[in-house]
Image (tube, helix red, strand yellow):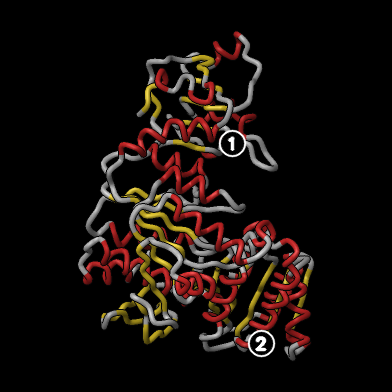
Amino acid sequence: MIKISNMIGISNAKLIFGSENESVDFNNFSKDSRIVKDGDVFIGIKGDNFDGNDYFEEAYKKGAKTCILSKKINITEELKDKYKDKNLIIVDSIEEFLVGLAKPIREKLSIPIIAVTGSVGKTSTKNIISDVLSSKYKVLKTSGNLNTLIGLALTILKVSDEEIAVIELGMSQAGEISKLTNFLKPNIGVIINIGTAHIGNLGSRENILKAKLELLEGLQDALFINNDNDLLNKWYNKKENNISTITYGIDKESDFQGQNLKYDKSGSHFSIENNQIDINVIGKHFIYNSIIAYAIGKHFKIKIEDIIEKLKNIPLEPDRMELINNNDITIINDTYNASYDSVYYALEVLSTFIGRKIAILGDIKELGDYSEKIHRSIGDLIIKNNIDILITIGDFAKYINEEAINLGFKKENSYHFNNKSEAIKLINSIKTPGDNYLIKASNSMKFKEIVEKIK
């Protein structure tokens, strides 16, 4: 709880109406006026295609007690009277304001902080690490994927009596991780991979590596890296850094190495340090996530048997490698988002299933000039994973289709559509008991609709 009087002046904050003596609880905040609950703090965020500042009255009507906006509005006596039991704060910058509130709290925190970043899988990894640590500690973690500077500030503003924190760091441009790490000053850093996400902004995977390594600027104690990732492995072997670095992996010899990998429809299975690990999710990428959770758990003195027990039921965010069995067909719902790396691992999982393997793939966004090249490289994965039927939807996904055919995929088993409705008609017409479907694309493609209409 932070008293409003202590907020005045931060990013030129002004109380337009309400009481300076009231306090704000940032444990209950919303950036979306549609889901505001009684007593919430509503924060007006301006996006590319919307301005949350315009919806403060809707937030009040839903029960918000305090609204924090970064846009000057017309304040009338009628408005003041209408919301006389509410608080309205106007600031110059939401980011500057929240960071200004959170910075002194972070400076007083003495708990260990673990920062997780990478091109793909950050949220899942953060959740698994947090779950393992929760067997011994009270854990503060990033809500959902609030991994920007605003998200970090809001996470720190929620701290109460936690004993350890696991924080996700995201970026789309160079310099962003630098801001995050210098604010957060994490004790432990984790870089899970260097892929192609945001390559359109950064220009190359090498530049993505540089951007992720900005994490070191604020890092206090140790860094854990995925040794199987080509660029991280190359960077590690140069030994140009002074930070203590611990490696984990599967294919390359590492400090923590997964072995004896197996998959079935109950999940994934592997061993580490002669301990058998069984997890409830399918996929090599989730084995990587589990290995780093094991390593972090051991680093913080969690009992091995407790780590193994936690990994049996790892927590999943919605629409991430969700296995759905319905009417004798199996659907892998991985519609939350997509990158080359996540498509690679998802197709690898599909290839292990018995029955027809049907890949339904859409556009991967934010690839810029690399869009055609990366989509064509997925065509090669279709061949290597023995996919039986390929269905693509979208402007760039057509290159997956074209390249697969160029490499020998049967044209009669390949379909491309410009919209989801045409694809759904085809899928429902060819659906056969025993089929296995992978449904995957960037979130903006809204492929969850396909999952819902073929179940």
Q: Position of residue 240 (x, y in %)?
A: 46, 66
Query: What number of labels is visible?
Result: 2
- Residue 297 spot, x, y in % from top left: 28, 64
The residue at which mark 1 appears reads as 45
Q: Position of residue 424 (x, y in %)?
A: 70, 70
Mark 1: which secondary structure? Answer: loop
- The mark that comes first in sequence, 2 or 1, is 1
Residue 141, image x and y in percent?
A: 38, 50
- Please name the residue that numbered disc 2 is placed on: 383
Q: Nearer the viewer, residue 259 or 324?
A: 259
Q: Quadrant of the N terminus?
A: top left
Seen from the viewer's position, the closer of residues 22 and 119 is: 119
Disc 2 residue type? Answer: Ile
Horizontal side of residue 192 vs 270, given as left or right = right
**Amino acid on which disc 1 is placed:** Ile
**Badge number at residue 53:** none
Q: What residue is shown at x 51% (from left), y 45% (from top)?
A: 179
Residue drawn at x 65%, y 65% is 204
Position of 55 relative to 173 (above/below): above
